[in-house]
Structure formats: C-alpha cells, structure tokens
C-alpha cells in the first residue's frame, strides 16, 4: 500500500512540475512557477516517503520503504523492484546516448548505465535491456558510441528514451552526427563521445552487459546532463 501511495505522490510531483512549466509558457513569464518550489519540495519529499515512515501505518508483513535513516542491518528495506527503484531515484546519474547502426537502420537509447570498465585497456561498459531496439542493433553492427550528453541536450535525451513514440532513425533528428572509427553515429556537440567496437556481451536477467573496446575518443565543450528522481538537471561548465 505504501508503495502505491508513494508512486502516486511521485507522479503528482512530476505532473505539478510539468503543469507549472506549461502555465509559464502559456503566460509568457515565470511568475507562476516562481511560487512553485515550496509546494514542489513538499510533493517531492512526500514521493520519497518522508511522510510515510510511521511504523504504525503498516501491517507487520508489509514491505517498508525506509527513507531518512539507514538501518545497519537493512531490515526495513524492501527487496523488490519498487524498493530498488526508490533507492535508485536517489542516485544522480550522468546521461549518455548509445548510438548504433547506419542510415535508416540507426537506433539508440538514452542510458545512465554507461561507464568505464577499465582505463587500461580502454574499455566501456553499458547495461542494455535485451528487449530494447538498441541491443539487437549493437549485436548486429558490432559497434556503439557512448555520447556523453551536455547541458543543452535534454530534448535529445527524451528522443532517445523513445518519448513521443520516436523509434530508430527518428531519434536522431534535430542534432548533427558524424563518425569516428567504428562507424557508429557520433553526436557532434556531445560533451564527449567514446567510440567502441563490441568486445563481449554478458546476458543476465532482463539486461545484457555490453563491453566495448574503445577505438576513438572525441572531447567537446560545455557542461553535462544529470538525471535524478525522474528529472534532468543541466550542469553548466
Ligand atoms: C534517464 C534514463 C536512463 C535510462 N537508462 C537505461 C539504461 O541504462 N539501459 C537501458 O537499457 N535503458 C535505459 N533507459 C531506457 C531507454 O532510454 C529506452 O527508453 C529504451 O531502450 C526504449 O527501448 P526501444 O528502443 O525498444 O524503444 C533509460 C531511460 C532514461 C530516461
């Protein structure tokens, strides 16, 4: 029950933020959202469970989302998908776009799971959902590029997450693309782009851990895009 309530509050926080932005756009000035942060903070706290950790609220066998203080034995943490999602919403993640394929056969995904496996040898790691359009394309083309997004790339992040029903090559619209060594599409104004050839893929559960041998690197300008609690944050350099 508590999870459902938290999800509702979380949705309310996101919807409220969206509504404030729409009102500002419609009225052409930020007067409305200027007063929004206090209410938004309350909703955000509520979505993170700050008002829900009364032990008396739950049945003895109910999973419990512990929020403010970490138990040393972790007994109050629910070991299920909702509990893990709740914890991960607290993690700030750098946002990248994984690109792969060529021409009309291009596709890709926005990810927070891309990171380096090792520096020497240079090797990247990304966890891709096996049911996504991106993993089969990476397997087929044997390449991918980790495009680390900059502070102006929120729209692109949405496109590569499939927002608005965009699929495949449609996700590449509105940005400039080039190539380095592997043939994977490279975002021209990425904060940095790391071009990889597929080295190994380890299938586990719903995802596949994709390892890429780094064959090209391109460093851009600007800040970076971070994802936390279901929202993007732009960090200027
Ligand atoms: C911020 C953010 C991070 C994401 N991180 C991952 C990720 O690490 N791995 C993954 O497979 N999908 C991730 N996704 C989901 C993909 O962007 C995308 O929605 C999914 O691959 C769509 O699959 P499709 O290409 O089949 O439409 C993330 C989405 C968002 C918005």
Image: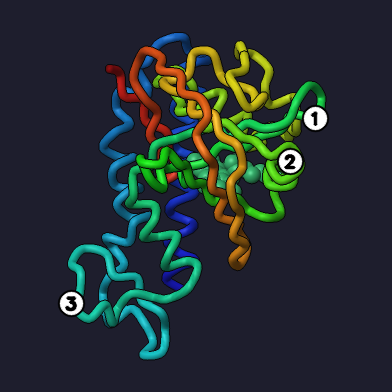
Would you name the residue on which mark 1 appears? 105
In the shown orientation, is residue 88 left or right of residue 183? Answer: left
Q: Secondary structure at mark 3?
A: loop
Determine whether the beta carbon of the residue marked 1 sits less than 8 angstroms from the nearest atom of ligand 1. no
The answer to which quarter of the image holds residue 155 is top right
Query: Which of the four quarters of the rendered structure image does ligand 1 lie in?
Result: top right
Determine whether the beta carbon of the residue marked 3 sits less than 8 angstroms from the nearest atom of ligand 1. no
Marks 1 & 2, CB-CB < 8 Å contact:
yes
User: Marks 2/3: CA distance?
Assistant: 43 Å
Mark 1 residue crowding within 10 angstroms, few (<14) / some (14–19) / many (20+): few
Numbered badge on residue 137 = 2
Residue 27, image x and y in percent? Answer: 48, 12
Mark 3 residue crowding within 10 angstroms, few (<14) / some (14–19) / many (20+): few
Residue 175, image x and y in percent? Answer: 61, 14
Identity of the residue drawn at 74% across and 47% down: 136
Q: Secondary structure at mark 2?
A: helix
In the shown orientation, is residue 185 left or right of residue 62? Answer: right
Identity of the residue drawn at 45% across and 64% down: 5
User: Marks 1/2: CA distance?
Assistant: 8 Å
Residue sitting at the far front: 121
Question: Nearer the viewer's eye, disc 2 or disc 3?
Answer: 2
């Amino acid at each position: 029950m508590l999870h459902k309530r938290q999800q509702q509050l979380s949705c309310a926080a996101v919807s409220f933020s969206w509504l404030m932005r729409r009102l500002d756009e419609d009225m052409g000035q930020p007067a409305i959202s200027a007063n929004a942060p206090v209410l938004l903070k309350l909703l955000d706290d509520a979505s993170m469970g700050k008002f829900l950790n009364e032990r008396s609220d739950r049945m003895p066998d109910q999973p419990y989302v512990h929020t403010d203080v970490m138990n040393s034995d972790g007994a109050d943490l629910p070991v299920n998908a909702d509990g893990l999602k709740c914890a991960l919403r607290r993690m700030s993640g750098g946002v990248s776009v994984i690109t792969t394929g060529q021409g009309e056969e291009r596709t890709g995904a926005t990810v927070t799971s891309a990171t380096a496996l090792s520096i020497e040898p240079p090797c990247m790691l990304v966890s891709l959902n096996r049911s996504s359009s991106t993993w089969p394309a990476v397997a087929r083309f044997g390449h991918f590029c980790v495009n680390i997004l900059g502070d102006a790339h929120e729209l692109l992040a949405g496109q590569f997450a499939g927002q608005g029903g965009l699929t495949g090559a449609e996700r590449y619209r509105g940005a400039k693309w080039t190539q380095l060594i592997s043939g994977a599409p490279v975002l021209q104004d990425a904060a940095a782009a790391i071009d990889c050839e597929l080295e190994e893929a380890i299938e586990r559960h719903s995802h596949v851990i994709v390892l890429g041998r780094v064959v090209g690197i391109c460093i851009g300008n600007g800040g970076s895009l971070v994802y936390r609690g279901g929202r993007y944050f732009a960090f200027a350099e």
